[in-house]
Amino acid sequence: MTNKFLILTLLVVMVTAEGKADNLTAPPEVPTAIELSNRDINRIVCPGRINDLIFSEEKGLTGHFAENNAFIKFKIEQLGDERSYAENPSEIFVVCDNSVYTLIATPKDIASVTLRLTAAPQKALNANIQSFNELPLEKRVLQVIREAYGKSYQSGYRIIEAADEIFLSPELNLTLTKIVNVDGIGLRLKEFTAKSAIQDELTVEEAFFLHPAISESLLAVAVDNHILQPGESTRVFVVEQKELDQ
């Protein structure tokens, strides 16, 4: 029998997201086109240690690296009373955990960008196993939910964006927005957006989501905000066991 339990209260772990830039990822060995800020310092995060950072200073780039972080900035030229910002794309090569990442960086007038390099498949599996190996099942589930709540996933996870509507009740509009696979551990997290569809205050309980349409191998449910006013939304996190898929 599947061991099902409810997480009735989310741990209050507030992690401020750095904006949509945190969703940028790049795989090894495949050239990746990205947009970087042409006025602020951009950050590159490696799942291991950065061995080297290679770029052309002639194209107006500066950068340095330490441990698992690299920082890139496009030079700004001062022309009299005006500033000239970079416009031309540049190649950046990051040797991260002994794998080469090729970035085609286009400077844009945007805020600072954080780019997370994804580990090679086997390294990702090993990293996941090492991270979770000593934890019992309950703590593995809690860790994944905390990361989802803070929008700060480990680099070894496979994240799939979704937009699937699921009907459970006329009172609630439910949409699957993200699937997070923790390969090597056998866990999968599903993130839903639940929006009130009624004109009165609505209480959203975890037990509402114990339904086959949500998961056939459910382990835990956590609701971000339990009380919704008309038109309000909340995030719902569901953790399931991958090996119990039908």
Image: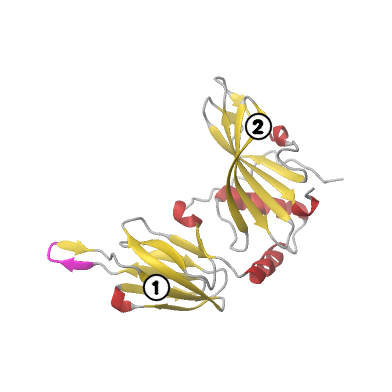
Q: In the displayed structure, would residue 192 be above or below residue 38?
A: above
Marks 2 and 1, how far apart at CA: 46 Å
- Counting from the top left corner in percent of width and height, residue 38 is at 31, 62
Measuring 25% from the left and 64% from the top, which residue is drawn there?
Answer: 85
Q: In the displayed structure, would residue 127 be above or below residue 18?
A: below
Toward which corner of the image does residue 124 lie, by quadrant? bottom right
Q: Which mark is residue 167?
A: 2
Closer-to-camera residue (119/140):
119
Measuring 68% from the left and 32% from the top, which residue is drawn there?
Answer: 205
Q: How is the image coloured?
A: secondary structure
For label 1, the SS is strand
Measuring 28% from the left and 66% from the top, which residue is drawn there?
Answer: 86
Closer-to-camera residue (81/25):
25
Amino acid under disc 2: Phe
Q: Which mark is residue 91?
A: 1
The residue sitting at the right extreme is 1
